[in-house]
Amino acid sequence: MELYQLLIIAVIQGITEFLPISSSGHLILLPGLTGMEDQGQVIDVAVHVGTLFAVILYFWRDVSQAILGLPRLLRGKVDTPGARLAWLLILATIPVILFGLLLKLTGLDDSLRSVAVIGWTMLIFGIILYWADQKGPEIKEDSDWNLRDALIMGIWQAVALIPGTSRSGITITAARQLGYKREDGAKIAMLMSIPTIAASGILLGAEVATSADLAIAKDAAIAALFAFLSALLALGLMMRLLRSISFTPYVIYRVILGVILLAYAYS
């Protein structure tokens, strides 16, 4: 694959994975609207791994705390902040795994990869994000995250398997509706991405491991590196901006793109 295409794919994935504008939707649209070669699952896995390492590095203090809490959790104890965080992240990931398996077994995952579907989800969930961000109170912090909120956000996250919804967007929407401050809700949403991206990466990786060769592995390494760098930049920028602005700019982008895609799909 040409270097410029790898860079475009990596940058798109890196920027859109954590912004509430849907990475999967943009990656599906890229070959469909530009005529570029479809990047395939190996590159998809690579760029997801790149973004996974970016969020782990950015939130390393919380991630390390959860890792250190895992041994106590395995012994059935949730009596430390780390064990509690690990437990809540696991619970929040269960709905998306179950829904993902359902889509995979029924074949619905492929049928949802269309410009029309992405257009509708961009538009509808963009409006819902705006409503939740404007109406949701800012009374909770990330330390207030509890079992009920983790399950609710996990269910909302499962909806993000529909292309164009945005995993970060839908979980941030849920967090704002539940009353979390913008920055704290985004932090929880980003932490929830770690087991989710890891699970999808393992699933896709198992499917493509037997077909990968040296040339593809080289392309994957390049894509992963640039996805990591662009994701780290986008994540840091978004978290800083949330201290002073709302999610409205992302909503405007989603609505405009959604309208354009629907006009294209039904023309």
Image (tube, grey):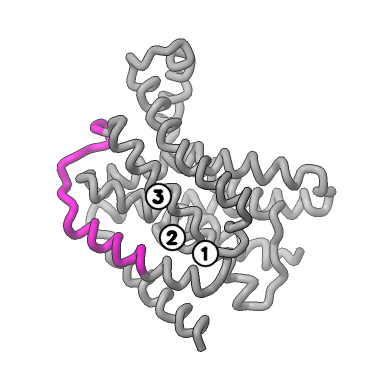
Q: Give the amino acid type for the residue marked by disc 3 in the picture.
A: Gly
CA gap between label 1 and label 3 equals 22 Å
Location of mark 2 (residue): 165
The part of the chain drawn in magenta is 124-144
| Image: 205 above or below 91 | below
N-terminal label among 1 and 3: 1
Q: Position of residue 210 (x, y in %)?
A: 81, 43
For marks 3 and 2, give the one nearer the viewer: 2
The reply to whether the C-beta atoms of the residues labelled 1 and 2 are less than 8 Å apart is yes
SS at circle 1: helix
Labelled disc at residue 236: 3
Q: Residues within 10 Å of mark 1 (few under 14, many from 20)?
A: many
Residue 163 within the segment the image draws in magenta: no
Residue 129 within the segment the image draws in magenta: yes
The reply to whether the C-beta atoms of the residues labelled 3 and 2 are less than 8 Å apart is no
Location of mark 1 (residue): 25
Q: Residues within 10 Å of mark 2 (few under 14, many from 20)?
A: many
Residue appearing at x 77%, y 49% in the figure: 217
Pick whichever, 112 or 67, lies toward us. Answer: 112
| Image: 128 above or below 204 | below
Q: Give the amino acid type for the residue marked by disc 1 in the picture.
A: Gly
Q: Position of residue 207 (x, y in %)?
A: 73, 45
